[in-house]
Amino acid sequence: MTNQFMRKNVWDNEYRPEQMFARDYLAELNEKWTIKTEYPVLGLTIDGKQWRKCVLDIAIMDPKIAVRLNGGYHFASGVQRNKDEFQKEALIQAGWVVVDFDSFMMPNLFKKKKNDETVKLAKEEMRNQLGKMQIL
């Protein structure tokens, strides 16, 4: 993310709208989950070799579920896609289940302004993705 983008004050607080929406809906789906946002995972390795830390958009602590919210930026370059794949592999090797919420597959989740219909559709998008991963 560029400094110019951050200076535009796109968000009212430190969390993105889709991140807050997803966090709140996940909490509704399972009240027993401990959910954290911007959760740093340290000490990651890939095949025993040290990998950089990663900061999860949303972490469900038990079971260890990493939710990554991938906006268009994540698909804009091969470098970013490779970084994301390595991160995913490191998380899997550390025992995390990785669930990607991709903007091109979940357009209603990533809409900045939601109405009753887009809220309903965004929740459906999330349920479908979690169902595919056999989390629900």
Image: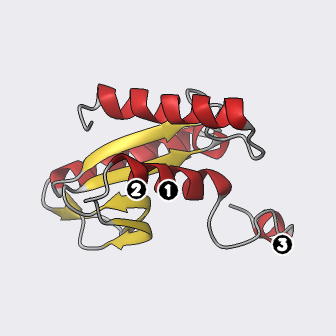
Q: Residues within 10 Å of mark 3 (few under 14, many from 20)?
A: few
Residue at x 17%, y 52% (from the top left corner):
93
The residue identified by callout 3 is 7
Image height check: is 20 above or below 121?
Answer: below
Q: Write down the quadrant of residue 94 in the picture.
A: bottom left
Q: In this view, does 34 lie to the left or right of 49?
A: right
Real-space Cα distance between discs 1 and 2? 5 Å
Nearest to N terminus: mark 1 or mark 3: 3
Tag 1 and tag 2, C-beta contact below 8 Å: yes
The residue identified by callout 1 is 24
Real-space Cα distance between discs 3 and 2? 31 Å
Q: Is mark 2 on a helix, strand or loop?
A: helix
The dot on residue 27 is 2
| Residue at the right extreme, as displayed | 8
In front: label 3 or label 2: 2
Front residue (pair 66, 28): 28
Q: Is residue 71 visible?
A: yes
Amino acid type, callout 1: Asp
Amino acid type, callout 2: Ala
Where's residue 119, x and y in %?
A: 63, 37
Where's residue 10, x and y in %?
A: 81, 62
Real-space Cα distance between discs 1 and 3? 27 Å
Where's residue 32, x and y in %?
A: 25, 59
Q: Is mark 1 on a helix, strand or loop?
A: helix
Tag 1 and tag 3, C-beta contact below 8 Å: no
Q: In this view, does 68 lie to the left or right of 1?
A: left
Residue at x 48%, y 39% (from the top left corner):
101
Q: What element carries label 3?
A: helix
